[in-house]
Amino acid sequence: MDARAAARLRTVLGHLGRLEPRDVVAHPTSGTVSPTSFHPQQFQFTLDNSILSLEQRQFYEENGYLVIKNLVSDEDIQRFRDEFGKICRKEVKLDRLVIMKDVSISKLQLAPSEKVVTKIQDFQEDPELFRYCTLPQILKYVECFTGPNIMAMHTMLINKPPDTGKKTSRHPLHQDLHYFPCGPSNLIVCAWTAMEHIDRNNGCLVVLPGTHKGSLKPHDYPKWEGGVNKMYHGIQDYDENSARVHLVMEKGDTVFFHPLLIHGSGRNKTQGFRKVGIPIAAPIGKDGCVSCSATPYGYDGLKPKNP
Ligand SMILES: CCCCCC(=O)SCCNC(=O)CCNC(=O)[C@H](O)C(C)(C)COP(=O)(O)OP(=O)(O)OC[C@H]1O[C@@H](n2cnc3c(N)ncnc32)[C@H](O)[C@@H]1OP(=O)(O)O
Ligand SMILES: Nc1ncnc2c1ncn2[C@@H]1O[C@H](COP(=O)(O)OP(=O)(O)OP(=O)(O)O)[C@@H](O)[C@H]1O
Ligand SMILES: O=C(O)CCC(=O)C(=O)O
Ligand SMILES: [Fe+2]
Ligand SMILES: [Mg+2]
């Protein structure tokens, strides 16, 4: 692991359970406000622009997520898959990339292949994969939450492996804001693109609608038997009776969600490796993230800054 990845892990561990969200809900005036699409109602979690319909805005405001169907083409997804394969086989090497293996196989000496890599993080130095963060159709929606000056503060490609029977392929219920001391949270959004059909069999995203209106909860390792992956923290005291929604997605569908939305994913009961691509985006200020002094999360501005 490189120094930057180590610093990030230290930051996360240092903040474990102590982080409070900085919910400064001062929305900048941003985007083009077209008279025909202006929604004169008070919105807290979406910005005024002409992209989202009133129904879409109201859905995100209420639930904290929004699924947009068929946003990324099969051709682009194939290119991302091919590049991911090269990284796994070590045909492409990236200095800052974090490579994660499932805890159930992490101590086995296995030949490099897609079957041993559970996730890559921080792929922003790979031009082919970073293209995902720059796709106009992704940025178009990201801008509805972040405003026009956008940066990717984190990038991931998850390759959820077939569960070995120990349930280690689960991702416990968590809030992404736990992983970065950053805000204002309402201007941050995660984009999660299904790279194939995903349902409960291969471990779809599970969300607790409306939880983005709450605060950042204490996270810690789940008390599960059989093994828990390093850094896969979960919320300890969520309401077990709260409604969980399993998001069934087709290849190319993308869900945008708020960093306080409680979400996770179940185990992969198939023999395939379930793939998704994720950038987490925030507005970019003059020196990086608008309010986060810890700039290691900040990468290139994805769009030219407004003067
Ligand atoms: C930001 C949005 C939300 C994000 C939400 C998330 O993604 S949550 C997850 C966030 N994840 C991260 O930040 C990345 C976490 N992963 C990593 O940093 C890394 O993959 C790693 C530290 C686990 C391993 O990196 P290394 O390059 O050091 O790999 P190495 O193979 O030498 O392993 C070092 C030691 O860690 C163990 N190890 C490896 N993978 C492991 C795993 N999944 N769970 C537990 N332990 C693991 C190994 O057995 C070994 O133990 P011994 O020392 O006993 O031999
Ligand atoms: N008993 C539990 N306690 C805490 N978290 C759970 C529990 N069961 C599931 N989860 C979490 O809820 C999310 C979704 O779980 P889900 O029930 O969809 O999958 P699963 O339990 O792995 O598989 P299955 O589809 O067989 O129920 C995951 O984040 C999982 O880690
Ligand atoms: O796709 C998944 O398994 C969930 C990933 C996730 O929520 C995360 O990495 O923060
Ligand atoms: Fe997450
Ligand atoms: Mg279950």
Image (spheres, rainbow, N blue to C red):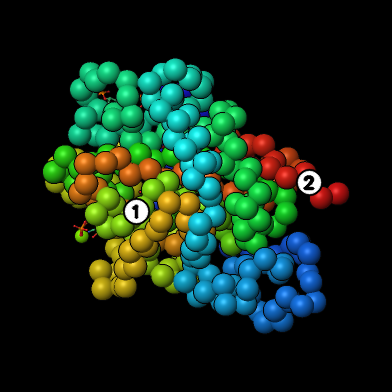
Location of residue 247 by image quarter: bottom left
In the current view of this chain or complex, which residue is farthest to the front?
75
| Amino acid found under the numbered disc labelled 1 | Ile
Please, what secondary structure does the residue beneath circle 2 have? loop
Vertical position of residue 293 compared to residue 104: above or below: below
Vertical position of residue 66 compared to residue 7: above or below: below
Q: Is label 2's Cβ within 8 Å of ligand 1?
A: no
Vertical position of residue 254 compared to residue 83: above or below: below
Seen from the viewer's position, the closer of residues 9 and 76 is 76
Residue 278 place in picture, x, y as percent = 48, 46
Location of residue 303 by image quarter: top right
Nearer the camera: disc 1 or disc 2: 1
Which residue is at a point 32% across and 24% down the rendered structure image? 113
Q: Tell me how far mark 1 sits from mark 2, CA to CA.
A: 36 Å
> In the rendered view of the protein, which quadrant contains the N terminus?
top left
- Left/right placement of residue 274 relative to residue 31 reads left
Residue 240 place in picture, x, y as percent = 25, 69
Whether the residues at callouts 1 and 2 have beta carbons within 8 Å, the answer is no
In the image, which disc is placed on residue 98? none
Q: What residue sits right under mark 1 in the picture? A: 198
Near mark 2 (Cα within 10 A), the count class, few <14, some 14-19 or many ≥20, is few
Which residue is at a point 27% across and 41% down the rendered structure image? 272
| Amino acid found under the numbered disc labelled 2 | Lys
Seen from the viewer's position, the closer of residues 299 and 127 is 127
In the image, which disc is placed on residue 305? 2
- Left/right placement of residue 81 relative to residue 168 reads right
Location of residue 128 by image quarter: top right
Residue 271 place in picture, x, y as percent = 21, 41
